[in-house]
Amino acid sequence: MAGGAVGRQSRDKNRREAFLEAARRLFFDSGYRGTSMQQIAAEAGYSKRAVYLDYQNKDELFISVCAEGLALLLAKLREVPWQEITVESCMARFLEVYIDFSREHPEEFRMIFSEATPAIIANCSPPIRSRVAELERQCLEVVVRLIERAVREGILQEIDPWEAAGIIVGSATGIILLSMGGSQTVFSRKTLESLVTRAIWTLWRGLKPEGSGLARPANRRGHDRNASHLPRSARAHP
């Protein structure tokens, strides 16, 4: 009996993973609207009915793929040695990781920050909703802790850290999404990525107390800090 139960659990896990992998490929190629449960089932080699044994709808598969992307981004952020470098070097490193993630995982970035609407998330089961919400909170919290530290050190004025983090991450996300779309007819992706850095440093300057300057971290690559190539590195959590 025990052996049979283990075998069933293994088969169920393999089936769930097959559906998730098939969904990932199709969402990457065709997006949310261009993908159906029938296509996912066929891609995985199962009947459409079998998909519903593990996922109640297409939205759950879509958000599950998004959650995997958020987990990957969070892992990259946690590699940065936040406590070992200055606050403004931390901000430069956050932008580096965020832009690199959008370059290396453009499909996940698009899905998470463009296609994953509140309505899609609301249509998922509580465990899936909770997982994606927690991952999103932890990613944003990296910037929240950075802003809290900057306020403590007198680098930034008193401000709601969650609100400020939302503004910074939202601004960076918006410009990166432009770089993935038709706006490249006016600006190249490289130029738009450079604009991400400029925009965030402009916002940062606006959060500083009156009379203080914007001290940018030393550029280890020898390039202009406004250039699209940001310094690379990574390792811990704020």
Image (cartoon, helix red, strand yellow):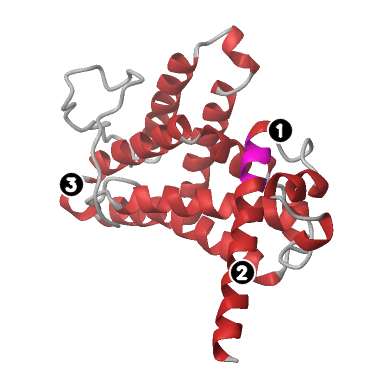
Which badge, 1 or 3, comes first in the chain's sequence?
1
Nearer mark to the viewer, of 1 and 3: 1
Residue lying farthest to the top in this orientation: 186
Residue 85 is labelled as 3
Residue 161, placed above or below residue 231 = below
Distance in Å between CA atoms under marks 2 and 1: 28 Å
* Image: magenta residue range: 23-28
Would you say residue 25 sits in the magenta stretch?
Answer: yes
Q: Residues within 10 Å of mark 2 (few under 14, many from 20)?
A: few
Q: Residues within 10 Å of mark 3 (few under 14, many from 20)?
A: few
> As rendered, which of 17 and 149 lies closer to the eye?
17
Q: Residues within 10 Å of mark 1 (few under 14, many from 20)?
A: few
Residue that numbered label 2 is attached to: 11
With 62 as the anchor, is 193 left or right in this view? left
Distance in Å between CA atoms under marks 1 and 3: 41 Å
Residue type for callout 1: Ser
